[in-house]
């Protein structure tokens, strides 16, 4: 599988648009084919790579399969838990006021920095500063 992936990457990177194949289906350089008088067919390398990967069971054009594969990779690499971190959350004015009141208590106790408090509540530092400025 690893070799197939490496070969696919090479095929996609080294071509300038098309690869050329003989009637037998072997890849050949266009200049070499012309010098030898061999008839060739231009083929989009992306289509060929997709066919090879699908033959090996990797259906990368199927969005559900691709999502499942990305989820698997994220879980294996330890990045699966942070799925919701990319989503924005809106805070109501009442929630903002409550957070600012809580910050005033924390600030009076001298326990945390503004940046640490903002991280703890899941808000960007600059957003938190803007809330304090009111």
Image: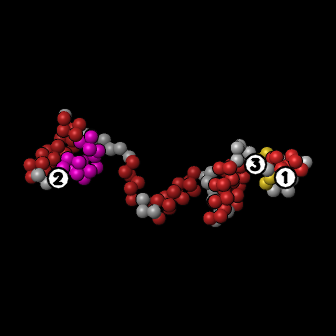
**Label 1, on which residue?**
22
- Helix, strand or loop under label 2: loop
Q: Is residue 93 visible?
A: no
Outermost residue on the right side: it is 37
Which image quadrant for residue 127?
top left
> Where in the figure is residue 104, as x and y percent of width and height?
12, 45
Separation of marks 3 and 1 at Cα, in angstroms: 10 Å
- Helix, strand or loop under label 1: loop
**Label 2, on which residue?**
112
Dominant SS type (magenta): helix
Task: Give me the residue at 13% from left, 54% from top.
Answer: 111
* 101 left or right, relative to 11: left
> Where in the figure is residue 20, as x and y percent of width and height?
79, 49
Q: Is residue 65 visible?
A: yes
- Helix, strand or loop under label 3: strand
Q: Compare marks 1 and 2 and give the one earlier in the sequence.
A: 1
Q: Confirm or deny contact between disc 1 and disc 2 (CB under 8 A).
A: no
> Where in the figure is residue 123, as x and y percent of width and height?
28, 46
Task: Give me the residue at 39% from left, 59% from top.
Answer: 81
Task: Give me the residue at 22% from left, 43% from top.
Answer: 95
Q: Label 2 crowding class (10 Å Cα cut-off): few <14, some 14-19, many 20+?
A: few
Q: Label 1 crowding class (10 Å Cα cut-off): few <14, some 14-19, many 20+?
A: some
Separation of marks 3 and 2 at Cα, in angstroms: 61 Å
| Residue 80 part of the magenta segment | no
Q: Which residues are magenta?
A: 113-128
* 58 left or right, relative to 115: right
> What label sits on residue 19 in the rendered view?
3
Separation of marks 1 and 2 at Cα, in angstroms: 70 Å
The residue closer to the viewer here, 119 or 121, is 119
């Amino acid at each position: 599988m690893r070799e197939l992936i490496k070969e696919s990457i090479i095929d996609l990177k080294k071509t300038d648009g098309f690869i050329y194949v003989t009637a037998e289906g072997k890849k050949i350089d266009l200049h070499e084919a012309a010098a030898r008088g061999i008839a060739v067919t231009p083929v989009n390398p992306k289509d060929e790579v997709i066919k090879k990967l699908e033959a090996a069971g990797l259906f990368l054009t199927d969005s559900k399969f691709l999502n499942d594969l990305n989820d698997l990779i994220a879980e294996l690499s330890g990045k699966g838990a942070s799925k919701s971190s990319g989503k924005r959350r809106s805070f109501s004015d009442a929630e903002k006021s409550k957070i600012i009141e809580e910050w005033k208590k924390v600030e009076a106790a001298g326990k945390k920095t503004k940046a640490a408090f903002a991280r703890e509540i899941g808000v960007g530092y600059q957003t938190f500063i803007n809330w304090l400025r009111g």
